[in-house]
Image (cartoon, rainbow, N blue to C red):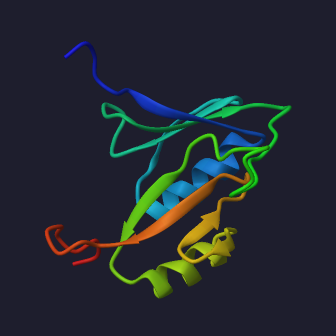
Amino acid sequence: MIGRLHHLAIDCPDPLRLAGFYAAVLGKPITYRSADWVVVADNDRTSGLAFQRAADHIPPRWPDPAQPQQMHLDVMVDDVDAAGAAVIALGARHLSGAVYEDPAGHPFCLIPRPGWAPPVNP
């Protein structure tokens, strides 16, 4: 092993807004915030998602290869339909099938929980 993942950093125009969206989707707290950098993680000693201000951010257009997705998250859920309604209520936009777009335009997928994984909401 060379290293350990610290954060997945995601460019966006409003770090606090996008961090709040993913904090609500994933049920995790915001553990650090500054004007240009906000972190969502289990606690302030674990890795997580980081959101950094990019004033000139151009959102991807899924599935347009001229503006590729750049990255995407797969979010495991117990019920795709219920989760879809919940993320839309938080500000997501439905693109196609299980693909949604977060408030900054990044695509993410709602993935049904596989049988080997414990329930997301026991």
Q: Quadrant of residue 9?
A: top right
- Residue under the point 57% across and 77% down: 97
Residue, far top: 2
Asked if residue 109 is positioned above or below residue 61 in the image, the reply reads: below
- Residue under the point 44% across and 31% down: 7
Q: Position of residue 30 (x, y in %)?
A: 49, 45
Residue, far right: 56
78 with respect to 33 (left or right): left
Q: Position of residue 58 (x, y in %)?
A: 82, 40
- Residue under the point 71% across and 30% down: 35
Q: Nearer the viewer, residue 107 or 64?
A: 64
Q: Nearer the viewer, residue 21 or 80?
A: 80
- Residue under the point 35% across and 34% down: 47
Residue, far left: 116
110 with respect to 107 (left or right): left
Q: Nearer the viewer, residue 110 or 96?
A: 96
Asked if residue 70 is positioned above or below residue 103 in the image, the reply reads: above
Q: Nearer the viewer, residue 26 or 63?
A: 63
Asked if residue 86 is positioned above or below residue 99 in the image, the reply reads: below
Q: Position of residue 38 (x, y in %)?
A: 58, 36
Q: Position of residue 61 (x, y in %)?
A: 76, 54
Residue, far bottom: 81
Report how many numbered discs are placed on residues in the image. Answer: 0
- Which corner quadrant holds the C terminus? bottom left
Q: Quadrant of residue 86?
A: bottom right
- Which corner quadrant holds the N terminus? top left
